[in-house]
Image (cartoon, helix red, strand yellow):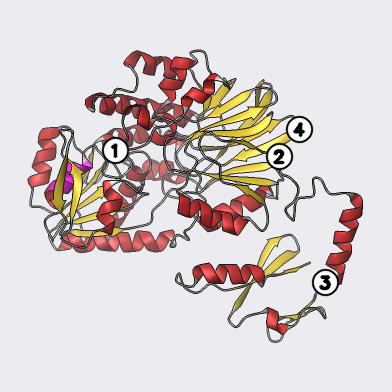
């Protein structure tokens, strides 16, 4: 096949992301990560499949472990492979690979050597966003994906066809990263390959989540307790630091030490050094205050194990932000083992938790239940959880609504859903099936990217005669719309074949989709009725021209 997708990992899971595009001019490999919590070969994507399909070059979308930590294994097989990424991703990848080498060696399953890591870093070719690369026959362009500093989506062009690979994407701006870039007008592509981490979820409003998060921390600190925030070291830890610093400066939180431990400490130092690549608001804040935006106020970088032990055993109120975010390893389990049994403390989860992670199991416990946490010696220790445990949705991934909106902006003939568990992928597929040809690829499965033209809205293979028939059908089904300025009402006259029973009871909103095309939808009021209401509103929508 000369226009196809082959997932090596990260298709029906969140972890070991690695995707190969089989193109007419050559093969393009995107990402090579590891599975968090797994060791040895079990942590890797199916990189053996590259033997039959060697890549012409590679793109690294961002520097999170599940996308970057397997790179040296790829370079071991293809020493001259060129890896394109943004400047920020190249700088952050150094720290992630060094930490991966350290942790995997301590576990007794080193993934690669220091020499292989060095060779990998030498293969990185930083390029700016929006620069079209044509050196390998096919072409590709990186666009900001909003997920992390330096993160990118990829627009691929081959043989007159186009693919939009979302990578990990977020349509919400945070203190440390701007939202994903989207074209101002609909840009039609042959296929979109989209992540689906939260494909079954409509996340709460971020501002409200931040408010309740700060409030919960304040309640714990004022009661004399200590707060542990297990956090992804890259991106999330820096956002949380900014939220807490701002809240303390404005009086929303009592002043207390903010300790950064594990890889979160090193990453935050690197973010401070990379300030010119961060949002302008952060740069302006440092310029105005004259203080380092991440390393000022009550922020403390935990230097060693001795200082960590002192913090663990202190009775003073404090906040600790420590890796890993899922409590798989690192410094966060050490704090959790000591603080979870005490009811005046709190542990707040702020990111995605995979199905087998200690963090996910902790969220499922009743108070006083036991969770198995790493003991720092290669084993697990049962720990009673009497402290306050809550989850706050401060995700760096778009939810279902954000993903559907982004996919619609590219008007694809075909959609492939990856980077998600069974539930989120299947749920999102249900929302897409009526408009697009949808595929849920498995790891190791080759999927043709050209759509069949069967789905409505795909006119690639539609004859002029069929187009005229569609236009005539649309004319017969036209509705008349009149705006009553006195009563501020939009009044609709339906065709004879449609009557008022088309609409269920409830309040409706008028949504402008593009240009003059609009849609009336029944409001979705609560999460319990969300699935049914969404299906109902799709069936009862009327498009207005």
Q: Which residue is mark 4?
A: 160
Q: Secondary structure at mark 1?
A: helix
Please name which of the two marks, 2 or 4, marks the residue nearer to the observer: 2
Confirm or deny contact between disc 4 and disc 1 (CB under 8 A).
no
Q: Which label's residue is closer to the chain start, 4 or 3?
A: 4
Quarter of the N terminus within the rendering: top right
Q: Residue at x 57, y 68 (%)?
A: 534
Please name which of the two marks, 1 or 3, marks the residue nearer to the observer: 3
Q: Which label's residue is closer to the chain start, 2 or 4?
A: 4
Prevailing SS of the magenta stretch: helix
Q: Secondary structure at mark 2?
A: loop
Q: Which residue is mark 2?
A: 450
Q: Which residue is mark 3?
A: 478
Using the numbered discs, state the Cα–Cα distance from disc 1 to disc 3 in whole angstroms.
Answer: 58 Å
Label count reads 4
Q: Position of residue 467 (x, y in %)?
A: 87, 55
Q: Position of residue 456 (x, y in %)?
A: 74, 56
Please name which of the two marks, 4 or 1, marks the residue nearer to the observer: 4
Confirm or deny contact between disc 3 and disc 2 (CB under 8 A).
no
Q: Residue at x 27, y 52 (%)?
A: 361
Using the numbered discs, state the Cα–Cα distance from disc 4 to disc 1 in whole angstroms.
Answer: 44 Å
Q: Quadrant of residue 206?
A: bottom left
């Amino acid at each position: 096949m000369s226009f196809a997708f082959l997932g090596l990992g990260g298709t029906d899971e969140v972890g070991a992301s690695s995707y190969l595009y089989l193109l007419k001019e050559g093969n393009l490999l995107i990402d090579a990560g590891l599975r968090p919590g797994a060791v040895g070969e079990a942590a890797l994507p199916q990189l053996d499949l590259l033997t039959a399909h060697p890549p012409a070059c590679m793109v690294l979308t961002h520097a999170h472990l599940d996308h970057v930590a397997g790179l040296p294994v790829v370079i071991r097989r293809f020493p001259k492979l060129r890896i394109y990424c943004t400047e920020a991703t190249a700088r952050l990848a150094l720290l992630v690979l060094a930490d991966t080498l350290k942790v995997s060696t301590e576990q007794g399953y080193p993934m690669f050597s220091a020499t292989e890591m060095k060779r990998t870093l030498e293969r990185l070719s930083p390029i700016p966003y929006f620069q079209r690369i044509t050196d390998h026959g096919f072409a590709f362009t990186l666009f900001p994906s909003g997920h992390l500093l330096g993160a990118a989506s990829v627009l691929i062009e081959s043989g007159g066809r186009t693919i939009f690979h979302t990578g990990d994407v977020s349509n919400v701006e945070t203190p440390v990263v701007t939202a994903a870039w989207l074209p101002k007008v609909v840009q039609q592509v042959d296929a979109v390959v989209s992540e689906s981490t939260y494909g079954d979820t409509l996340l709460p409003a971020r501002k409200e989540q931040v408010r309740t998060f700060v409030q919960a921390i304040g309640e714990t600190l004022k009661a004399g307790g200590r707060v542990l925030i297990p956090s992804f070291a890259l991106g999330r830890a820096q956002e949380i630091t900014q939220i807490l610093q701002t809240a303390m400066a404005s009086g929303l939180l009592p002043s207390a030490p903010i300790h950064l431990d594990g890889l979160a400490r090193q990453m935050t130092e690197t973010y401070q050094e990379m300030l010119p690549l961060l949002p302008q608001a952060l740069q302006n804040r440092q310029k105005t205050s004259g203080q380092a935006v991440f390393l000022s106020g009550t922020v403390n970088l935990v230097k060693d194990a001795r200082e960590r032990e002192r913090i663990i055993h202190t009775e003073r109120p404090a906040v600790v932000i420590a890796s890993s975010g899922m409590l798989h390893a690192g410094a966060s389990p050490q704090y959790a083992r000591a603080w979870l049994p005490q009811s005046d403390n709190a542990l707040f989860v702020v990111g995605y938790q995979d199905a087998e992670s200690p963090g996910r199991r902790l969220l499922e416990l009743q108070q006083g239940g036991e969770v198995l946490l790493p003991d720092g010696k290669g084993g697990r220790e049962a720990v009673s959880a009497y402290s306050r445990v809550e989850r706050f949705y401060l995700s760096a991934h778009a939810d279902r609504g954000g993903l559907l909106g982004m996919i619609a902006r590219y008007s694809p003939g075909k959609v492939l859903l990856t980077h998600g568990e069974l539930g989120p992928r299947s749920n999102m597929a249900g929302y897409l099936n009526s408009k697009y040809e949808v595929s849920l690829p498995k790891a190791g499965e080759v999927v043709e990217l050209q759509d069949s033209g069967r789905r409505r809205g795909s006119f690639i293979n539609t004859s002029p005669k069929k187009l005229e028939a569609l236009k005539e059908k649309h004319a017969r089904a036209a509705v008349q719309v009149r705006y009553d300025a006195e009563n501020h009402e939009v009044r609709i006259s339906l065709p004879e074949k449609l009557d008022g029973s088309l609409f269920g009871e409830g309040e409706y909103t008028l949504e402008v989709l593009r240009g003059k095309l609009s849609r009336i939808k029944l409001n979705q009021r609560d999460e319990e009725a969300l699935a049914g209401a969404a299906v109902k509103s799709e069936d009862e929508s009327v498009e207005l021209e």
